[in-house]
Amino acid sequence: MQADATIALGGCDTQANEPPTAQKEITCQILEDSFSYEVIKGDPTLNVGVEERREVAELDAAGKLEPNLTENGIPNDVLAKLLPGDDVIELAAPKVAGGAFYQFIKRLFDIISCGLALIILAIPMLIIGIRIKAESPGPVIYAQRRVGKDGKIFDVYKFRSMYIDAEARGAQWAQGDDPRVTPFGKVMRRTRMDEIPQFWNIVKGDMSLIGPRPERPAFCEEFEKRIHGWHYRTTVRPGLSGLAQVTGGYDLLPKEKVILDLEYIENRSLSMDF
């Protein structure tokens, strides 16, 4: 079986003079699973062997397989799952709740609570770092670009929960059962330990304890095309956690998430936050 180097990730080509077994694979898909590619048979009766997997890996290493990405670097199949159908949603601008007193108390609480947390958790953070290093190579803490208040881009900090180069094939949306996540990373995500470094983001003023979760610029640009008003989420400071996370977490689609985020923005108060 020969692959056409001009064909994007997601399909492969075969020659007409190849045996029937090879021709059956004309509709095969090359899918990403952690850091390897698998040839998935177009015919359910066709077995996929080690040799086919090796060929795909070699083609990928040679740079002959290009990911099928949007202009913002998001795999098209990922985006299709996040934005199913062709509907375009129109959102009204929210009336931002919370006056000067609320904002002062909220900010004061953020600084004091997160500053103390960083001091108290210094030793546990060191232990977490050692555990991350022992499990897989790479940095303990990584920075990722996110969209903050009023569209300002900032670096959000997290303990690394994924294998290195987990997004070599384009930006991915976080999901509950993610194959890119390390075993200890799954524990950190389940307990939210991976987000402890974001206490520093909160002290700096990039974030708050409570608010809409900050998203990556690439996803924000794509979502805005189909969810007109997605950017309204950035009318307030993003949060470590929020109404959308408490309600549905990783299982929510963007269109469901933004509705909850705007509901929070319109009703936020000290009683709602705490």
Image (cartoon, rainbow, N blue to C red):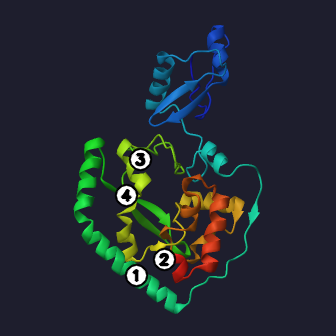
Disc nearer the start of the sequence (2/1): 1
Mark 1–mark 4 Cα distance, whole angstroms, equals 20 Å
Q: How far across and down, in percent of the image, does residue 184 sit?
A: 35, 46
Marks 3/1 in contact by CB < 8 Å: the verdict is: no
Q: Residue at x 63, y 42 (%)?
A: 77
Q: How far across and down, in percent of the image, does residue 47 sit?
A: 57, 15
Disc nearer the start of the sequence (3/4): 3
Q: Residues within 10 Å of mark 3 (few under 14, many from 20)?
A: many
Q: Amino acid at mark 3?
A: Lys
Q: Mark 2 — residue?
A: 274
Q: Residues within 10 Å of mark 1 (few under 14, many from 20)?
A: some
Marks 3/4 in contact by CB < 8 Å: the verdict is: no
Secondary structure category for the residue under label 2: loop
Mark 2–mark 1 Cα distance, whole angstroms, equals 10 Å
Marks 1/4 in contact by CB < 8 Å: the verdict is: no
Q: Mark 3 — residue?
A: 186
Q: Residues within 10 Å of mark 2 (few under 14, many from 20)?
A: few
**Residue mark closest to the camera, 3 vs 2:** 2
Q: Mark 1 — residue?
A: 109
Q: Residues within 10 Å of mark 4 (few under 14, many from 20)?
A: some
Marks 4/2 in contact by CB < 8 Å: the verdict is: no
